[in-house]
Image (cartoon, rainbow, N blue to C red):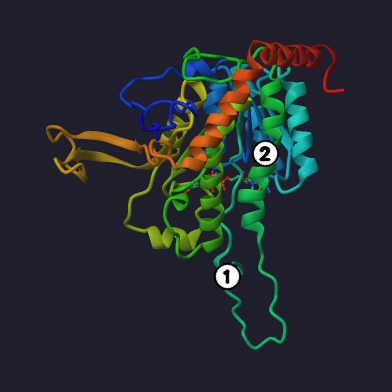
């Protein structure tokens, strides 16, 4: 009897490990409409500037009106195009996010969104997380869950709205590893996790929990997102020099390595521009020279050491779906069978619905 294959990576249409030595072209983001929450500062601002310079239309959703508006104006002036817009959005407020997505659709030259980056996040305040300081009070006070509200509830709102709008992106096709390298009409969510998604961060438990949750969301969705035609990818940056890092964190990190926004932007741009990448994640760390030992471990070396390479990007969690249990095998097979049964008729019906949307809007 033939044993069932436990490797589901092709069934979920996960693309192969990323070969970082193969260059991508940032100009492939041209004409894409990209929505970035938290786009007024740090990584978000880096994404907005780089993608606008390469011809994308970017909609910033942020609570920081001053900085968001400044960046939009600065980029419009620099590019001479009406290509960057700021919309006030508090990601913890459902209606505020609904408004952001609707505005993005109106501002998008083709009436759709190609990529959603739920990037807004805060570090949280250690004192206000899970440890009540005063044990003598009669009633415990509730914890401040702001980091959870922004970093995971806000992301869930964005993802929910992305799954509504991305498949309605006029002219877009369901994602696939056989997509064109440059596919302007895309359906893509780029999650912003952290190294705190991969290991514990002892002084910021709420932040660590929220970023583990983002990882869990990404790992779950990458198994089924192809059914909606949406591709999902994720960044897991190490500590990077942005305003999120306050003085205590900077003091604790003194003398250690710190990553650069430009490397985060580089990793994000590879995901956004190359439509063939599905279900992959990249860690961004301090750029240094590394050499791989015979036992597979990487060691830091002097620049120029024979056999070494200078890198800031690493791929984690590449093999979730290579070895799967019966439950996941059966559910993925069932989902693929439904899609197969719907066949060209299902595809045609969805296309008619999408055309109806194009003609009559969302009514
Ligand atoms: N910088 C790092 O070391 C690091 C490392 C790993 C992951 N990250 C993650 O990257 C993302 C961006 O962080 P950053 O370093 O650029 O920080 P940042 O503080 O520079 O930018 C965060 C942005 O989010 C916005 N924001 C905060 N609350 C919001 C809300 N309720 N609604 C809408 N916008 C809101 C802020 O106004 C700001 O513009 C976050 O999710 C963060 O957790 C950062």
| Image disc number at residue 127 | 1
| Image disc number at residue 158 | 2
Q: Does the beta carbon of the residue at mark 2 sit less than 8 Å from ligand 1?
A: no
Left or right relative to 346: residue 184: left
Residue in view at x 62 percent, y 85 percent: 135
Does residue 290 sit above or below 349 in this rendering? below
The quadrant of the picture occupied by the C terminus is: top right
- Image position, residue 265 (x, y; %): 47, 32
Residue 46 in view in this figure? no
Task: Determine the secondary structure under disc 2.
Answer: helix
- Image position, residue 10 (x, y; %): 44, 26
Residue 266 in view in this figure? yes
Q: Quadrant of residue 63?
A: top right
Residue in view at x 51 percent, y 39 percent: 328
Left or right relative to 257: residue 164: right
Is 295 in front, or is 256?
295
- Image position, residue 94 (x, y; %): 77, 44
Does residue 329 sit above or below 182 in this rendering? below
Ranked by sequence position, the earlier of labels 1 and 2 is 1
């Amino acid at each position: 009897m033939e044993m069932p294959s436990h490797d589901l990576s092709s069934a979920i249409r996960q693309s192969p490990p990323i070969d970082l030595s193969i260059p991508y072209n940032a100009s492939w983001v041209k004409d894409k409409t990209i929505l970035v929450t938290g786009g007024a500062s740090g990584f978000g601002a880096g994404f907005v500037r780089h993608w606008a310079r390469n011809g994308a239309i970017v909609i910033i959703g942020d609570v920081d009106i001053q900085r968001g508006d400044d960046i939009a104006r600065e980029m419009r002036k620099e590019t001479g195009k009406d290509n960057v817009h700021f919309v006030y959005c508090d990601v913890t407020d459902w209606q505020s996010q609904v408004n952001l997505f609707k505005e993005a659709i109106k501002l998008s030259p083709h009436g759709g969104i190609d990529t959603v980056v739920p990037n807004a996040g805060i570090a949280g305040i250690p004192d206000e997380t899970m440890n009540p300081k005063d044990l003598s009070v009669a009633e415990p006070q509730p914890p401040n869950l702001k980091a959870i509200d922004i970093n995971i509830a806000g992301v869930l709102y964005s993802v929910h709205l992305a799954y509504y709008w991305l498949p309605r992106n006029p002219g877009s096709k369901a994602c696939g590893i056989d997509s064109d390298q440059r596919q302007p009409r895309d359906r893509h969510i780029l999650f912003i996790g952290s190294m705190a998604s991969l290991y514990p961060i002892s002084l910021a438990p709420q932040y660590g929990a929220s970023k583990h949750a983002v990882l869990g969301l990404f790992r779950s969705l990458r198994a089924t997102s192809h059914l909606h035609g949406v591709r999902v990818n994720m960044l897991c940056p190490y500590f990077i020099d942005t305003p999120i890092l306050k003085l205590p964190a900077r003091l604790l990190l003194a003398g250690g390595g710190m990553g650069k926004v430009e490397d985060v932007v580089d990793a994000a741009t590879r995901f956004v521009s190359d439509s063939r990448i599905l279900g992959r994640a990249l860690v961004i760390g301090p750029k240094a020279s590394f050499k791989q030992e015979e036992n597979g471990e990487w060691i830091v070396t002097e620049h120029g050491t024979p056999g070494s390479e200078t890198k800031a990007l690493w791929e984690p969690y590449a093999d979730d779906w290579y070895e799967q249990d019966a439950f996941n095998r059966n559910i993925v097979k069932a989902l693929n069978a439904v899609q197969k049964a719907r066949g060209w008729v299902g595809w045609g019906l969805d296309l008619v619905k999408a055309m109806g949307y194009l003609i009559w809007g969302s009514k």
